[in-house]
Amino acid sequence: MKLRRIEMKNSSLVIKTFIITLISVIALSLGTSYTYHSHIANAQTSLKKEPAKFVRGVDGDTVQLLYKGKQATFRLLLIDSPETKDPRKPVQKYGPEASRFTTSMMANARNIQVQFDKGQRTDKYGRYLAYVYADGQMVNNAIVRQGLARVAYVYPPNNTYVQTLYASQSRAQAEKLNIWSTQTTKSTTETSTVPKATKPIATVNTTNKTNKTNKTNKTTKTTAPQYFKNCTAMRQTYPNGVSKNHPAYRSALDRDKDGWACEVK
């Protein structure tokens, strides 16, 4: 009987020790997580935002702004959009859409701000490296969320918002938006050490065409042109109009000559 009491006492002691250890581990884990997220939040709020004015779009990840009284080129940090301006490469798929998205988002905004990270502020081409905001929304993150750019060129300490961008990219991938519609998920860290240099393009008319669905581009592929007498007829089949590379596109229906016929304004 005495031996049984001793065994029960030892068993109770083991259980108490296990519970105390488990609680300590959980508390330490929660404390570490809180400390990490608190550090990230503090790092983000410590980055100062400065006013600027939109001048023109270059492509999806590059814009020209009026900053401190001078016109300057800004390369959006931590992202890369499909190429449209590199003379060595053809225009990449979704490149024009990415350019229109960034230009429209910024041109329609009343308040433009730039935010530099903790590292270098310019690249070897003299372009500023920054997070750019349009009416409080980070353009870098918005274009990634739309699946029109990917996370790239991650070089600490210029990586304060990288987890935010990866989260947006994951959602775009899950929804198979734009560049992810025909690709499998793969590593997005670029091997190149320097973002591409680009030349500015003329400011695009700022009608927001970024919400056009991809249904137009997903129609049956055919080399035979489709003829519509006017935009009324075209919109019965393609409610949002068609892009320049679509078989139904005609320059006569593209009144503003922006590469999109019969768009809804």
Image (cartoon, helix red, strand yellow):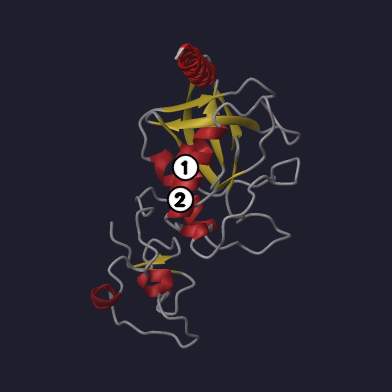
Q: Nearer the viewer, residue 109 or 72?
A: 109
Which residue position is annotated with label 1? 168
Q: Nearer the viewer, residue 111 or 43?
A: 43
Measuring 53% from the left and 19% from the top, which residue is drawn there?
A: 25
Which residue position is annotated with label 2? 172
Instruction: Left or right? Give the position of 183 relative to 176.
Output: right
Contact, mark 1 vs mark 2 (Cβ under 8 Å): yes
Q: Real-space Cα distance between discs 1 and 2?
A: 6 Å
Measuring 52% from the left and 21% from the top, which residue is drawn there?
A: 29
Residue 47 seen in the figure: no
| Location of residue 88 by image quarter | bottom right
Amino acid type, callout 1: Ser
| Location of residue 162 by image quarter | top right
Q: Residues within 10 Å of mark 1 (few under 14, many from 20)?
A: many
Looking at the picture, how far across and down is residue 54, in whole percent? 47, 34
Q: Nearer the viewer, residue 113 or 153?
A: 153
State which quarter of the image contains the N terminus: top left
Instruction: Left or right? Give the position of 235 relative to 146.
Output: left
State which quarter of the image contains the C terminus: bottom left
Instruction: Left or right? Give the position of 236 relative to 4.
Output: left
Number of marks present in the image shown: 2
Q: Is residue 182 above or below residue 36?
A: below
Helix, strand or loop for disc 2? helix
Q: Which mark is residue 176?
A: none
